[in-house]
Image (cartoon, grey):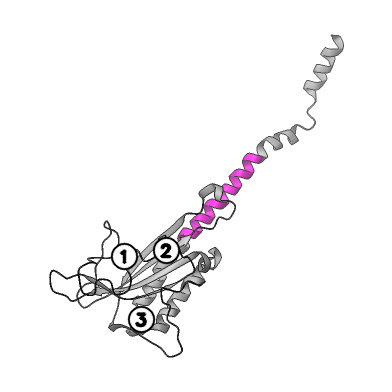
Amino acid sequence: MTRLHAFARRFRGDVRGLALIEFAIAAPVLITLGLAGAEVMNMALAVMRVNQISTAISDNVARVRDSIDESDVNEALLSAKLIGTGIGFGTNGRVVVSSVEPNGKDAPNTGQYIRWQRCTGALNIPDSQPKYGTQGKGQNDNVLPYMGSSARRIVAGSGSALIFVEVTYRYQPLVSSQFFGTPTLRSESVYNVRERNTQVLAAVPGTTASVCTTYAA
C-alpha cells in the first residue's frame, strides 16, 4: 500500500503532457468555430454580391437615355459576371431583366405589360425562372396588375417604364454544406427609366441578344 500511495502521489503531481491533452480536447471546438465563422462570412459576402448585382443592373439599364438597344443591355448584364466573380455567379446564378410599362388598355384590361425581357447566367432551376411573367405578358389584358410580391407591389406610371431585375444564386459553400446547405439566394431591384424617349429594345447588327432561352456562364 505504501508503494501504491507513493505512485499515486507521483502520478498526481506529474503535469507532463497536460497542455497537449488540453489542446486535444479544445482543438475540435476551436476548429469548428473557426470554420463556422468562415462560412458565415462567405454567406454574408454572397448575399451582398447578389444584392449588388440586382441593384447595379437595374440602375444601369434604367439610366440609358434617349433609346436603348441590345448592346446596352449586354453591357449592363456583364456587370453580373464582374461583381459575382468571387462567388462563381456565372455558373451558379441567373439574372432576369424586364422592361415594364402600362399596357395602355381601357378597363377592364388595364394593367402592366412586359415589353421586353433579357437574361444571363447558367442557373436553370424553377427558382431562377421569371417569377412574375415572361416577355409579352399583360400586353392585351389585366393579367399583370403589378410587379413584385403582394406585399411589395410596384407599377409603372403613365408614360413611364420600370426596369425590374430578378437575381437568383445557388449558394456555394466555402467549407461545407453542413452549415447552411446550398440555399437559393434571391434579390429584386427596380428603377424608373430616366429620360428615354422610346422603350423599344433595338437590334444591333453583329450583337447577340441575351434571350431568356439561353443558359450560359
> In the image, what residue type sits under mark 3?
Val
Q: Which residue is mark 3?
A: 64
Task: Name which quarter of the figure residue 10 lies in.
Answer: top right
Span of residues in magenta: 28-48
The residue under label 2 is which amino acid type?
A: Ser
Q: Earlier in the sequence, mark 1 or mark 3?
A: 3
Element at label 2: helix
User: Image point 64% across, 44% down: which residue?
Assistant: 31
Amino acid beneath label 1:
Tyr
Q: Earlier in the sequence, mark 2 or mark 3?
A: 3
Position of residue 135 measured from the top left corner of the image (x, y, whole percent): 32, 74
Q: Is residue 88 left or right of 109 when viewed as pictured? A: right
Q: Is residue 33 magenta?
A: yes
Within-10-Å neighbours for mark 1: few <14, some 14–19, many 20+: some
The 10 Å Cα crowd at callout 2, few under 14, some 14 to 19, many 20 or more, is: many
Number of dots carrying numbers: 3
Q: Residue at x 25, y 73 (%)?
A: 113
For disc 2, the marked residue is 128
Instruction: Return the residue at label 1.
Output: 132
Marks 1 and 3, how far apart in space?
24 Å
Marks 2/3 in contact by CB < 8 Å: the verdict is no
The answer to whether residue 43 is above or below residue 139 is: above
Residue 7, position as x, y percentages in the image: 84, 17
Q: Residue furthest left?
A: 107
User: Which image quadrant is residue 8 in?
Assistant: top right
Q: Residue furthest right?
A: 3
